[in-house]
């Protein structure tokens, strides 16, 4: 168990009569069908993907992906078209390419008569830090990954996409997991004492694939804001709610960013 | 009908008769107009000329009336009455017209006046009594002791019978022969320990005279009647029960006064500010109940000598310590224990009061987290020394500290947070003369937070040093002035990080130093027996002192420039805040009070957290980017007593306009953000409301009902599309009731009920998905409200030894907070998954695709406690 978790547990002792319960809260949903852009292009030479979806008026109502958009990225007078891959619900680049340093990339989306735009420049990425697994108490063969580096790290803004596979170790039940971890060079009150996050538990011998993305300042601000409203929301300290920022203009949600990437794969021991 | 007409006719005739009677002499005198123009002529010659011109004769005693005095006299075509008035004004000689004779009377010699001043104190402990009355019974001549027990009463020469009175004390008559100024100490004897307080109410005229409708005077004993939480009658929690003051939520030390923000209140202990009055994130306050002697709460018309906050000032005066005999008292309950000790150092001259409190939570968490600790403690000390009849020294020291984290703080990877409040006051009371009292204080206050995850440490602090001289001049029983000056220095560090040397990219923060200089004056003038005017001003100069680095921003909040300020003041603000209060005694049992005040605030609480818990707040001073907050408040208060002062009804309406109110851009990083000032958004707040309270005392029962309707609407540039929105503290309806019963067998029951509208909050109007997480979308700010709050607290107190004269006294208190176990929400969440046999959690494996649920978070339901108290 992480030290922070002890602190949260300790806090909970004082709020011994505090309680979190299920409640049926009527969301004052607005009939607002807006486009959501998740476009993270990397410096890896590959087929790049962009995910377009719509908003939902309910918490678990499903987020339908967008099929009828025209998507392209332009840079230095070059146009890179993206086409819908309906099997993956993403728009994939026509040709493989990697984001280059010192170039401005512009995302263009034509949807329902509107043209939406955003731009980004490549960020740097620092080496992947040492990955440490924690032994799950009372389970000799189970490991947990609770963090990568420290969330507050003044040296970098980074996001880790971690995929874990232990399908080669078992024949029953789900044998894959995916989780995101972050390092931020700024700190927010919700981040200091966060709600308890379910441990990412897997057996020894699992294959752990790590993709580290360096974040530019605006993308880091977007992700941090997203976490304030999601993962970091719900403990004893919390701030006023606010919409996440976006760089998609004039009116959409989500973010477009270009990131340098490092990957690593290891066997969890 | 006929009778009615007859009555009207009689009234009309009577009025006409009065008009004729009034006019007849004027007509007569108009016929005899006087014209005289002489200089330096004897009065007798002037009288002769008047007599010649009017035909009226003068009659007087030449031995008493000096007619040889020379006067200048110029009148032209004036009637006799006006001529005689001119003579009266010039010489003091009064007159009376009888027929055609004018009787002259010698001027009355001005009666000699002397001042009776001194201190009123407790006969058993020597403790000075605050707000005790001294006056002449049956006449509206009297005064009250100030916050140091001093009084000054100027009366005519001669013998006087005075009465001294104070709540909980026996009345005492004092006979004085006033042929010179007298400085005297008067002792009052406390009433019997077990008499119900309702039987010792003071006379109505004293209550009315003392009553300040814009301020609440509370005795700690009154607050102790309220059911306590977790074994302590927390002063801050008790304040939240007052009309017009709203609590933040359960478990919080924050409160809101008449629509103001939580940083617009300040608590002073013996003049020293307490910047964070809470322990354990807000469940307890740093004020040890035994330490307080009096509490004054100002929601409007704040005194000119106090400030600078926009919404309320709470002034707590502490006990001096027993000057006559030693004493020991304490309390034990499952969560805290405390002990207080007082003793004379030199009998009747000097005393010491020490109190220590410590938490006792380890039994709660020891098994679960043996390597971690959570605790708080308080240490408070008061020393005083009477140098002589005119000089007295006091020292007050307050220290409160909290810790939560690894027991071994020095080990690698240790994690934790500690925070502390301290304040101290060195005070010199000096009586310059019978009419002038002064209080000079040197005081400090500080609040600091340190969070650590070894080797990283973050700390923020706010500190102040102040010197203040306050003078009160008792000109006469109908007029007194308060004036003085104050110089303060503020030290603010919004958050500094230190880390191991391998990490060097850290924001560079420098502490800010600011200086405040204040001059103030306030006068209280009894214009008539029924009208009292209280007015004053507070002139304040604020200066940001260099060397410092600050930033400038454009209209779009973009950084424009970095400015290096040299040594000395690099930015200043000056404001003159007037305040006016008019009190009208409508009848022998009712008062009306109208007040207006303008206020400025130079320190802002910078936190976008709406959590009930304190601790991580930061403070920023007024600066080139932050204009001082400003408020203007109008209030009208009404009070009426019925049934020989056993029933009290009061009502108030108010309107408050607040400018330069701080808000934040969405999800602003308030920590380690050098450009934080660029993320601030400024706007206005409009607050208005109606307060009603009815208090009743009946034999051994007493209690009150209170209702408050209020609205608080904010409008902030670039927030909520520039549209107005309800503030967090906008809770239109607020109702509370209190009932207390003291049985003949020394048993006490207390019931307290509170209900109020839920606070506004921003709930999602939709969601989108990013990184496989459901991210909320918000519409209008504060578009939703939490459910209404309801709570019933009950306590039962048993005095275990009801011996009036017994030296050892002890009691047991059983109390239950939120007896009905109502779920009072502090937040609603939309981001967690339900786990079997585990609390709701944030999911980490996004592939599991578990549905999220809405959850409600609440704190205290049915919280019982038992406390044993003793005193020797």
Image (cartoon, rainbow, N blue to C red):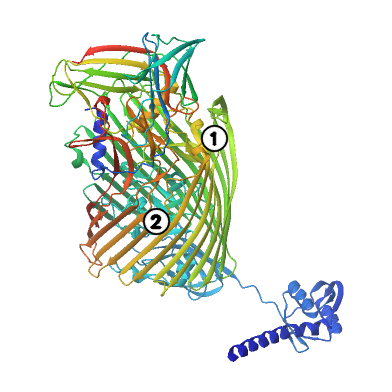
Between residue B830 and residue B681, name the one nearer to us. B830
> What is the distance, in whole Å, between disc 1 and disc 2 at their CAs?
37 Å
Residue B534 at what x, y percent from top left? Answer: 56, 60
| Mark 1 or mark 2, earlier in chain | 1
Asked where in the image residue B190 lies, by quadrant, the reply is bottom left
Asked where in the image residue B627 lies, by quadrant, the reply is top right
**Callout 2: few (<14), some (14-19), or many (20+) C-alpha neighbours within 10 Å?**
many
Q: Residue at x 66, y 85 (%)?
A: B12
Residue B524 at what x, y percent from top left? Answer: 56, 61
Mark 2 = which residue? B734
Between residue B119 and residue B30, name the one nearer to us. B30
Query: In the rendered image, is residue B691 in sight?
Result: yes
Label ID, residue B412: none
Residue B53 lies, with reference to residue B303, above or below; the image says below
Residue B464 at what x, y percent from top left? Answer: 46, 39
Residue B410 lies, with reference to residue A29, above or below; the image says above
Label ID, residue B623: 1
Question: In the figure, is residue B720 to the left or right of B354?
Answer: right
Residue B133 lies, with reference to residue B571, above or below; the image says below
In what quadrant of the picture does the C terminus of chain A appear? top left
Disc 2 on helix, strand or loop?
A: strand
């Amino acid at each position: 168990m992480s030290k922070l978790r002890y602190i949260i547990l300790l806090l909970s002792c004082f709020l011994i009569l505090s309680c979190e319960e299920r409640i049926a809260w009527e969301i004052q949903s607005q009939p607002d069908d807006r486009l959501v852009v998740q476009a993270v292009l990397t410096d890896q030479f590959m087929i790049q993907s962009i995910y377009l979806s719509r908003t939902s008026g309910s918490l678990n109502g499903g987020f339908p992906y967008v099929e009828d958009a025209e998507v392209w990225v332009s840079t230095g007078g070059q146009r890179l078209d993206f086409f819908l891959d309906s099997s993956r619900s993403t728009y994939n680049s026509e040709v493989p390419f990697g984001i280059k340093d010192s170039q401005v990339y512009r995302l263009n989306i034509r949807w329902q008569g509107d043209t939406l735009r955003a731009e980004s420049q490549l960020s740097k990425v620092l080496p992947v830090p040492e990955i440490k697994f924690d032994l799950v108490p009372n389970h000799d063969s189970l490991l947990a990954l609770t963090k990568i580096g420290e969330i507050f790290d003044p040296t970098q803004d980074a996001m880790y996409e971690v995929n874990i596979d232990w399908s080669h170790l078992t024949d029953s039940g789900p044998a894959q997991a995916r989780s995101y971890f972050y390092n931020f060079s700024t700190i927010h009150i919700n981040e200091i004492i966060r709600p308890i996050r379910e441990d990412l538990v897997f057996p020894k011998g699992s294959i752990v694939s790590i993709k580290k993305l360096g974040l530019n300042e605006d993308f880091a601000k977007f992700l941090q804001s997203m976490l304030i409203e999601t993962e970091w929301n719900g403990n004893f300290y919390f701030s006023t709610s606010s919409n996440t920022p976006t760089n998609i203009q004039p009116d959409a949600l989500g973010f477009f960013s270009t990131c340098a990437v490092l990957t690593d794969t290891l066997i969890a021991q | 009908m006929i009778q009615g007409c007859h009555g009207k006719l009689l009234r009309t005739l009577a009025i006409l008769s009065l008009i004729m009677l009034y006019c007849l002499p004027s007509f007569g005198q108009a016929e005899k107009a006087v014209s005289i123009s002489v200089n330096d002529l004897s009065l007798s010659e002037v009288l002769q000329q008047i007599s010649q011109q009017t035909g009226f004769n003068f009659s007087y005693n030449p031995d008493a009336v000096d007619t040889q005095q020379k006067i200048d006299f110029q009148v032209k075509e004036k009637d006799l009455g006006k001529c005689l008035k001119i003579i009266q004004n010039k010489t003091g000689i009064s007159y009376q017209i009888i027929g055609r004779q004018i009787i002259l009377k010698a001027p009355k010699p001005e009666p000699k006046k002397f001042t009776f001043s001194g201190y009123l104190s407790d006969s058993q402990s020597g403790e000075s009594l605050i707000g005790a009355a001294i006056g002449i019974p049956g006449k509206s001549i009297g005064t009250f002791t100030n916050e140091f027990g001093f009084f000054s009463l100027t009366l005519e020469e001669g013998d006087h019978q005075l009465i001294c009175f104070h709540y909980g004390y026996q009345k005492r008559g004092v006979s004085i022969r006033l042929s010179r100024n007298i400085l005297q100490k008067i002792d009052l004897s406390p009433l019997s320990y077990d008499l119900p307080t309702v039987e010792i109410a003071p006379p109505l005229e004293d209550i009315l005279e003392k009553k300040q409708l814009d301020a609440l005077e509370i005795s700690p004993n009154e607050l102790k009647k309220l059911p306590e939480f977790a074994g302590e009658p927390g002063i801050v929690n008790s304040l939240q029960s007052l009309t017009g003051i709203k609590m933040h939520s359960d478990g919080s030390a924050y409160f809101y006064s008449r629509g103001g923000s939580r940083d617009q209140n300040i608590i002073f202990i013996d003049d020293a500010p307490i910047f964070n009055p809470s322990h354990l994130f807000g469940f307890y306050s740093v004020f040890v109940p035994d330490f307080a002697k009096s509490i004054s709460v100002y929601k409007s018309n704040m005194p000119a000598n106090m400030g600078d906050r926009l919404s309320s000032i709470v002034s707590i005066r502490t006990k001096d310590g027993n000057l006559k005999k030693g004493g020991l008292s304490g309390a034990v309950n499952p969560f805290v224990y405390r002990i207080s000790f007082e003793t004379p150092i030199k009998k009747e001259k000097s005393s010491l009061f020490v109190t220590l409190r410590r938490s006792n939570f380890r039994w709660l968490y020891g098994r679960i987290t043996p390597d971690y600790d959570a605790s708080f403690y308080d240490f408070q000390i008061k020393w005083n020394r009477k140098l002589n009849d005119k000089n007295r020294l006091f020292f007050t020291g307050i220290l409160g500290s909290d810790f939560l984290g690894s027991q071994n703080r020095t080990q690698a990877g240790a994690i934790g947070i500690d925070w502390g409040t301290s304040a101290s006051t060195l005070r010199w009371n000096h009586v310059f003369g019978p009419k002038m009292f002064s209080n000079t204080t040197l005081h400090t206050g500080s609040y600091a937070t340190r969070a650590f995850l070894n080797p990283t440490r973050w700390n923020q602090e706010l500190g102040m040093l102040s010197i203040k001289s306050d003078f009160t001049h008792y000109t006469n029983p109908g007029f007194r002035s308060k004036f003085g000056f104050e110089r303060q220095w503020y030290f603010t560090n919004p958050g500094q990080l230190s880390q191991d040397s391998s990490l060097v990219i850290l924001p560079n923060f420098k502490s800010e130093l600011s200086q405040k200089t204040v001059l103030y004056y306030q006068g209280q003038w009894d214009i008539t027996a029924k009208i009292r005017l209280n007015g004053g001003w507070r002139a304040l100069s604020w200066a940001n002192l260099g060397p410092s680095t600050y930033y400038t921003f454009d209209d779009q909040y973009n950084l424009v420039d970095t400015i290096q300020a040299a040594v000395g003041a690099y930015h200043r603000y000056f404001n003159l805040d007037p305040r006016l209060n008019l009190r009208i005694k409508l009848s022998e049992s009712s008062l009306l009070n109208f007040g207006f005040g303008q206020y400025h605030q130079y320190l802002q609480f910078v936190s976008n957290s709406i959590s009930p818990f304190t601790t991580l707040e930061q403070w920023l001073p007024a600066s080139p980017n932050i204009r001082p907050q400003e408020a203007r408040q109008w209030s009208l208060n009404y009070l009426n007593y019925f049934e020989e002062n056993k029933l009290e009804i009061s009502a108030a309406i108010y309107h408050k306009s607040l400018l330069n109110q701080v808000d934040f851009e969405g999800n602003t990083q308030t920590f380690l953000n050098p450009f934080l000032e660029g993320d601030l958004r400024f706007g206005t707040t409009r607050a208005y409301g109606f307060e009603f309270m009815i208090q009743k005392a009946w034999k051994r029962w007493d209690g009150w009902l209170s209702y408050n309707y209020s609205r608080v609407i904010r409008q902030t540039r670039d927030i909520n599309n520039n549209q107005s929105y309800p503030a967090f503290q906008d809770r239109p309806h607020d109702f509370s009731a209190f009932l207390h019963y003291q049985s003949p067998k020394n048993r006490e029951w207390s019931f307290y009920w509170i209900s109020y509208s839920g606070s506004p909050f921003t709930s999602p109007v939709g969601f989108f998905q990013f990184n496989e997480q459901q991210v909320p979308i918000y519409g209008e700010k504060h578009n939703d409200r939490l459910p209404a709050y309801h709570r019933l607290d009950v306590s039962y107190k048993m005095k275990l030894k009801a011996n009036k004269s017994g030296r050892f006294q002890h009691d047991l208190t059983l109390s239950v907070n939120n007896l009905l176990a109502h779920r009072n929400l502090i937040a609603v969440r939309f981001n967690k998954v339900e786990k079997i046999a585990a609390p709701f959690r944030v999911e980490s494996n996004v592939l599991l695709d578990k549905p999220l649920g809405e959850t409600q978070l609440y704190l205290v339901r049915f919280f019982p406690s038992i406390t044993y108290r003793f005193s020797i």
